[in-house]
Image (cartoon, helix red, strand yellow):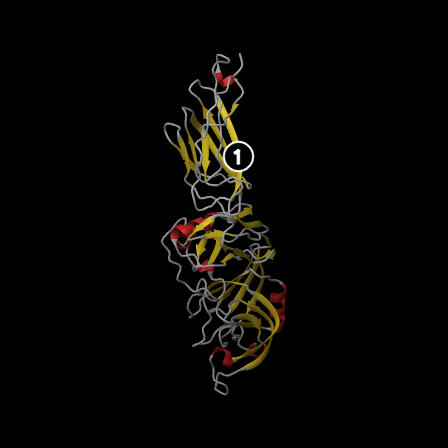
Amino acid sequence: MGHTPRRRTVPAGALLLVSLVLGASACGGSSNPLADPPYDATGQVRVTGSQEGHKADPSKPLEVETSGGDRITDVTATDAAGRYVKGELAADGSRWHSTGALAAGAHYTVRVSTEDEDGAQGRRTIGFDTNPADRLLRVSFGPQNGTYGVGQPITAELSEPVQDPAARAVVERTLRVESTPAVQGAWHWIDNRTLHYRPAEYWPAHATIDVRATLDGIKVGGGLYGGPSKPVRLTTGDRVEAVTDAAGHYMTFTRNGEVLRTIPVTTGKPGYATRNGVKVILGRESFVRMRGTSIGIAEGSEDSYDLPVYWATRVTWSGEYVHAAPWSEGSQGMDNVSHGCTGMSTANAKWFFDNVRVGDIVKVVGSAGATMTPFDNGFGDWNMPWKQWREGSALVGGKREGTGPADMARMRPRL
């Protein structure tokens, strides 16, 4: 005996969304109602959150209600990207409501399963669109696609400031970094617009790193929604490390653990001591004109200089380089006479320049100078202990206000 649908009417003026008439239940049928095909529910359920022919407000919850004795057994709501909307079903099956925010400018498909008093199963599927957002939060990743050294951090620059801890957590959950081989890593909020990502240790050599965001359409808070972003793919080269012992006046250059060259150097003299710690190569400039006035040295004073400099490898934005210094070759390997840079012979500087890339590691030990700061003068990220780094994540620390420096220092050439 076939399933006979029951006819019910929906009250007029039914809420904000599409009225789903989910009707029909069994008055007979097989002895096992679960074996019958689902009936097309046309009268028992309504979904609130949009109107027929109109777009839904993504800031309002999605609600599914039933009447006339039928109960809701399951609701799934997904957008076109396959993202599910979290929700909660009442114990009596009369109502389901979303507990997660809808995305802006998205198309949703809602699938509702019901059951009548006789145990017959009903189904109904509808689709609707949400309004686009008035304010979009965009993220720009850095660096650009390419091959880098194993010390290169990932950066994320936001188009608008995000300070609220809950909003930060929403943003951070959408920022995805996947590497092959896999490593443990974390985002760290530098300020309200800037995040850096690094592993606990340096990246593996010859790794592939994919960076993307799933922020598009996601509600961040305060009327702000995520916008589209462009993914980046990075690869790493060999593990190159250049370690300068400022007290010993030598640099040891290694590639994948093998020492390739030991180079006599000179570093910063008293009053201009070179920064200790790990720095990351920011760029390579075959020629730079360096002037003492750029770092506050008065023209014509004893320490004044204005020099053409070749084979300059930059490690800070304020002007610290590894470069050729033919004028100090007599002191290289013996004494520190520079204004903060690491100087070496022209031949060694050219060799260094030709054997490094952006993202390679330059470390200084044994200097009387302070330790390289983590964020305001280049990439000193590796000078922050891993435990402290993780506490800068909104998903781990959660209380960081992010009042650190937002902008890098201006480039000021310095010897």
x, y percentage for residue 313?
Answer: 57, 68
| Residue placed under numbered mark 1 in the picture | 126
> Residue 101's quadrant in the figure?
top left
What percent of the width, then of the height, locates residue 172? Answer: 46, 50
Can you say whether 10 is above or below 32 in the image? below
Residue that sits furthest to the bottom in the current view:
300
Instruction: From the viewer's perspective, tell me whether residue 282 is left or right of residue 389.
Output: right
291 or 156: nearer the viewer: 156
Q: Extreme front residue here?
A: 12
At horizontal 41% and vertical 40% (from top left) the residue drawn is 99
Q: How many numbered circles does the render carry?
A: 1
Q: Is residue 48 visible?
A: yes
Left or right, 143 with respect to 298, comes to: right
26 lies above or below 305: above
In the image, residue 356 lies at what x, y percent?
A: 60, 62
Query: For this rendering, which residue is in front, 97 or 365?
Result: 97
Q: Does the rendering let one see residue 393?
A: no
Return the x and y of residue 88 as percentages of the image width and height: 40, 35
In the depicted view, which residue is nearer to us: 303 or 163? Answer: 163
Q: Regarding mark 1 in the picture, which secondary structure is present there?
A: strand
Amino acid on which the number 1 mark rests in the picture:
Ile
Residue drawn where x is 43% and y is 44% of the image: 60
The one nearer the camera, 302 or 255, is 302
Give the class, few, some or many, for how many residues have Cα within 10 Å of label 1's Cα (few <14, many ≥20). Answer: some
